[in-house]
Image: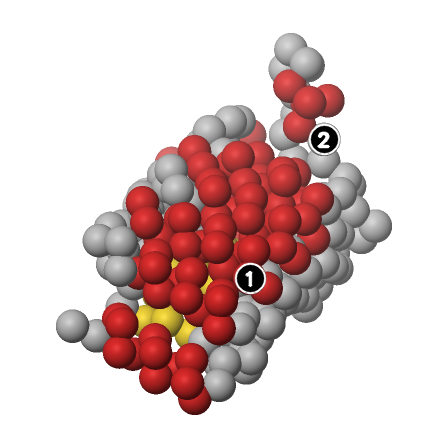
Amino acid sequence: MGLEQFFDALRISDYDHEMWYGEEKVAKDMKLQQLDKKFFCGLKSLNISNSNSSGSGNFPVFKYKDYEVKTNPEWPAFFSFIKEVKLEALGLTNCKLNHKCIELYASAIGSKPTECKHLLVLNLAHNPITKEGARILAPALEENKSIQTLDLSHTQLGVYGVTLIAKSLQKNNTVKTLNLFKNTIDVDGARAIRDMLKVNSSIEFLDIGHNRIREKGLEAITEGLKAGKSNVKTLGLRLNFINDDGINKFFSEIIL
């Protein structure tokens, strides 16, 4: 079963309609088309990690501009599924998502076309999104008003990709948990995060472990945390190139 058919199967069922409509006779008299429009499951969290949902698999490559010019476009089932069942958490870890198919998910969390206002958790970890995918995802994150947990760990963003994500989160005040573990951000990426922390007051959990952060990078992060806006309560720094002197300096400056 492809993912498009999978979403349809979750959203619409052919069994036990009377349990949902409360009256068996009414349910039996309803036409199939009416049932299709009215019957939705109560699913809140969907984890389809380790599936092949890339453009070469079950989903075709989605190009928003191609759909935007159509008068009455038929949107992928993915869009209507998230909106109609009011999905709150979506797990897409290791789904072979690259920059060519990330536009589907960026469009889903942006202001158009579906306004998925109920999605709170988006996990895109272990996908080759790269800086090109970040270029597409960043504008959607900037305008999104619902996502509270965003996992972009192991997504090959690099310095430029992380910089784009960090800039978008300067204008976002809903993301509380941000995971950027292992994206090779180095000192320039750390400086971009510093600039984000100076103005962002919503992020409470930040993981920037395994990112080649050295003393200068940690100094930049420290500067962002001390700026006054930041509400970070948990900071992940493991597996970086930080020696004892760097850690001691960090604690001496960050702890009042």
Q: Residue at x 63, y 65 (%)?
A: 184
First-in-chain label (1 vs 2)? 2
Q: Quadrant of the N terminus?
A: bottom right
Given residues 181 and 111, the one toward you in this image is 181
In the rendered structure, the answer to whether residue 56 lies left or right of residue 208 reads right
Amino acid carrying mark 1 in the image? Val
| Residue indicated by mark 2 | 63
In the rendered structure, the answer to whether residue 215 lies left or right of residue 210 reads left
Q: Residue at x 22, y 53 (%)?
A: 228
Where is residue 128? Give x, y as percent: 72, 58
Given residues 139 and 112, the one toward you in this image is 139
| Residue indicated by mark 1 | 187
Could you tell me if residue 253 is visible in this image? yes
Distance between mark 1 and mark 2 Cα atoms = 34 Å
Q: Residue furthest right?
A: 56
Q: Element at badge 1?
A: helix
Q: Residue at x 55, y 56 (%)?
A: 189
Q: Quadrant of the C terminus?
A: bottom left
In the rendered structure, the answer to whether residue 228 lies left or right of residue 12 reads left
Around disc 2, counting alpha carbons within 10 Å, would you say few (fewer than 14), some (14 to 19), or many (20 or more)?
Answer: some
Given residues 242 and 6, the one toward you in this image is 242
Where is residue 59? Give x, y as percent: 74, 46
Q: Is residue 109 above or below residue 1?
A: above
